[in-house]
Amino acid sequence: MERRKFLNLGLVAAAAVLAPMTNLYAVNFRETKPDAWKAEKSPEAIKAMFGDAPLKKTDKIKFVAPKLAENGGSIPITLKTDLDIETIALFQDANPRAATVVFSVPEGQKVDYSFRIKMRQTALVTIVAKAKDGTLYTTGKEIDVSIGGCGG
């Protein structure tokens, strides 16, 4: 029994030493950028989230989504890039609010995210990524929705 206590204490000590070294930094964008979450259209949500800086179209962000979503209640999205990104966000005009998801990218990490979104109708989906140097990159595509995922 003493050996188990010793091993458990060792694990706790190791976790206590390593925890400050991990980057657990995340921004609560609903608190820091509330106007972006109130905007009904993508351009105004993007402006509220990232300001007036020009958007640079790029093919360096791989945005994978179905052209036709049979069920708008669960649309798979994949975002990948090797750019040095600090924030990446998805906007769409199908739902009452344009801002859909925003990720803070930990220092030194690459974007390789997969998730699902809801859309009630066909709309353009826009991705905006803010690089560490402040450059805003964008890409997007239209997703056709057969059956709406937000009550309709």
Image (cartoon, rainbow, N blue to C red):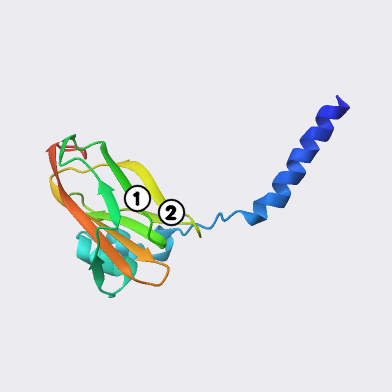
Q: Which image quadrant is residue 33 in?
A: bottom left
User: Residue sitting at 40 percent across and 61 percent down?
Assistant: 85
> Circle 2: is it few (<14), some (14-19), or many (20+) Cα within 10 Å?
some
Q: What element carries label 2?
A: loop
- Kindly identify which residue carries mark 2: 110
Q: Is residue 5 visible?
A: yes
- Work out which quarter of the rendered image holds the N terminus and state it: top right
Q: Nearer the viewer, residue 21 or 71?
A: 21
Q: In this view, does 34 lie to the left or right of 120?
A: right
What whole-number distance in Å separates the C-alpha atoms at marks 2 and 1?
A: 8 Å
Q: Hey, what amino acid is under mark 1?
A: Lys
User: Residue sitting at 42 percent across and 68 percent down?
Assistant: 132
Residue farthest along the top direction in this orientation: 1
Question: Counting residues from the N terminus, which is met first, the one under dot 2 or under dot 1?
Answer: 1
Give coordinates of residue 78: x percent, y percent: 31, 44
User: Residue sitting at 30 percent across and 55 percent down?
Assistant: 61
User: Residue sitting at 79 percent across and 39 percent down?
Assistant: 10
Give coordinates of residue 52: x percent, y percent: 27, 75
Residue farthest along the right direction in this orientation: 2
Q: Which image quadrant is residue 74 in?
A: top left
Q: Is mark 1 on a helix, strand or loop?
A: strand
Q: Hey, what amino acid is under mark 2?
A: Lys
Residue 102's tag is none
Q: In this view, does 104 lie to the left or right of 94?
A: right
Q: Is residue 93 visible?
A: no
> Circle 1: is it few (<14), some (14-19), or many (20+) Cα within 10 Å?
some
2 above or below 118? above
- Work out which quarter of the rendered image holds the C terminus and state it: top left
Q: Are marks 2 and 1 in contact (CB under 8 Å)?
A: yes
- Kindly identify which residue carries mark 1: 80
Give coordinates of residue 57: x percent, y percent: 22, 64
Give coordinates of residue 44: x percent, y percent: 23, 66
